[in-house]
Amino acid sequence: MSRAWTVFRREWAAYFASPLAFVLIGVFVLVQAALFFYIGYPIGPVPLPGLWDGGQANLLTLFTWLPLSLALIIPALTMGAWAEERRAGTEELLLTYPLRPWEWVLGKFLASWAVVMLLVVMVTVPLAITVANLGDLDWSTVWVGLVGAAGLVAAYTALALCGSALTHEQLVAFLLSTLLLGSLWLLRMLVAYAPASLAGFLEQASPQAHFLDTAARGVLVAADAIYFLLWMGAGLVWNTLLLERRRLQ
């Protein structure tokens, strides 16, 4: 585990060694704030108003955007995690180090997860303070929402890293990861058009059902933790197998 921590520190420093992370953080924070205050969430059968129109002292609109927003920002942050190593030819060198493939995967995953959670916290806390100054905000829903967001970020990040591990082109990695995470987000949109026998499965397979209906509203459910852990575990195992196969070639 200590060697995975070493990888974490290497990757964490690499994220902030280039301006990309700072640009993405700035764009993410500004866009989410604009959506929260002015636009709301107009997607789906029950749209949510922005703060100024709705006048409700909660962060539900912000949390409702997260499954879609993260499906775009996480691939942008993780696309170079493995793809750049392969393009630069450093992956072969990394695999000669006295670290197991799962330690590299875990270290990169933890660093990516920490960066994305930093984005989420930087958006959520200032908006929560603003709302609390304007009305009677229930802070427990904010903290529970962040706990749920941590699970959502973990699942998305583990899957997005697999997209990066499949190619040596960062743009291709971004597109693959976005397609995968976007497909998960779309599952709930398909429920209304699916036959009854399939609708229940699509609903339970959707990340929205395990975040928006529970943690985003201040409720923690054990089944949601299991759901996100399963996706996270699947992504990490898949990533490790891809790396192990290339190490043996």
Image: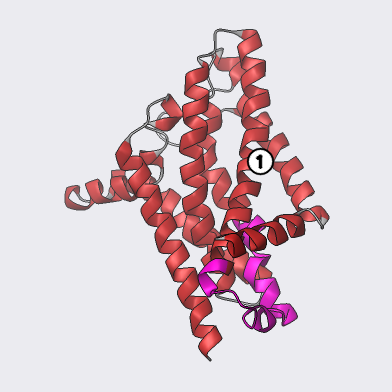
Asked whether 77 falls inside the magenta stretch, the response is: yes
The answer to whether residue 154 is above or below residue 239 is above
Question: Identity of the amino acid at label 1?
Answer: Leu
Residue drawn where x is 69% and y is 41% of the image: 28
Asked whether 95 falls inside the magenta stretch, the response is: yes
The answer to whether residue 138 is above or below residue 152 is above
| Residues drawn in magenta | 75-103
Indicate left or right for 31 with 153 as reference. Answer: right
State the image quarter where residue 238 is shown.
bottom left
Q: Which residue lies most toward the bottom here?
A: 249
Residue drawn where x is 47% and y is 64% of the image: 236
State the image quarter where residue 203 is shown.
top left
> Mark 1 = which residue?
119
Q: Is residue 42 visible?
A: no
Q: Residue 89 at x, y = what percent?
A: 72, 82
Q: What secondary structure is the stretch in magenta mostly built from? A: helix
Residue drawn where x is 48% and y is 61% of the image: 180
Q: Quick one: quadrant of the N terminus?
A: bottom right
Of 1 and 130, nearer the camera is 1
The answer to whether residue 240 is above or below residue 130 is below
Of 96 and 121, nearer the camera is 96
State the image quarter where residue 44 is shown.
top left
The answer to whether residue 212 is above or below residue 22 is above
> Tag 1: Cα neighbours inside 10 Å, few (<14), some, or many (≥20)?
some
Q: Is residue 167 visible?
A: yes
Q: Residue 245 at x, y = what percent?
A: 49, 84
Q: Considering the numbered disc 1 on the image, is that residue within a helix, a strand or a loop?
A: helix
